[in-house]
Amino acid sequence: MDTGNAIALSVAFDKNTKVIAVGCSDAEIKIISMEKAEMVGSLKGHEDAVNGVIFNQDNNTLYSVGHDGSIKVWK
């Protein structure tokens, strides 16, 4: 899984959309398609490393927590 120069710190899998969210040291969340085996997007909003990511399987919502102390909700 290529995350560029960033270090992968956390990983979550969404079985509904078949994507992996990777919380990275560069303050981004990389979105990886399991079907394409490539990065299909990224989410920016944290000011520091993304320490945790988790999907809510009921409504395709991604939650993330950053080293900056913030919690983000991504729909």
Image (cartoon, rainbow, N blue to C red):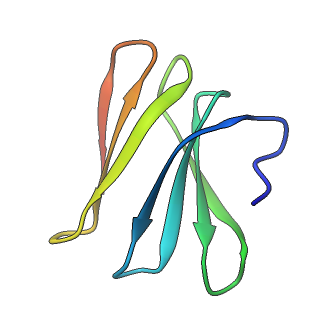
Q: Is the residue 61 above or below the residue 52 in the image?
A: below
Foreground pick, 46 / 57: 57
Foreground pick, 61 / 22: 22
* Residue located 52% across and 17% down the image: 47
* Residue located 34% across and 82% down the image: 16
Residue 58's image quarter? Answer: bottom left
Residue found farthest to the right: 5
Residue 36 lies, in percent from the top left, at: 70, 83
Q: Is the residue 60 above or below the residue 22 in the image?
A: below
* Residue located 47% across and 29% down the image: 51
* Residue located 65% across and 28% down the image: 25
Residue found farthest to the left: 58
Instruction: Tell whether 36 sits left or right of 33.
Output: right
Instruction: Tell whether 65 sits left or right of 24.
Output: left
Q: If the image is split into quadrants, where does the N terminus sit?
A: bottom right
Residue 10 lies, in percent from the top left, at: 51, 42
Q: If the image is split into quadrants, where does the C terminus sit?
A: bottom left
Q: Is the residue 60 above or below the residue 70 in the image?
A: below
Instruction: Tell whether 10 sits left or right of 25.
Output: left
Q: How many numbered circles are shown?
A: 0
Residue found farthest to the bottom: 35
Residue 74 lies, in percent from the top left, at: 33, 49
Instruction: Tell whether 39 sits left or right of 22.
Output: right
Residue 68 lies, in percent from the top left, at: 43, 12
Residue found farthest to the top: 68
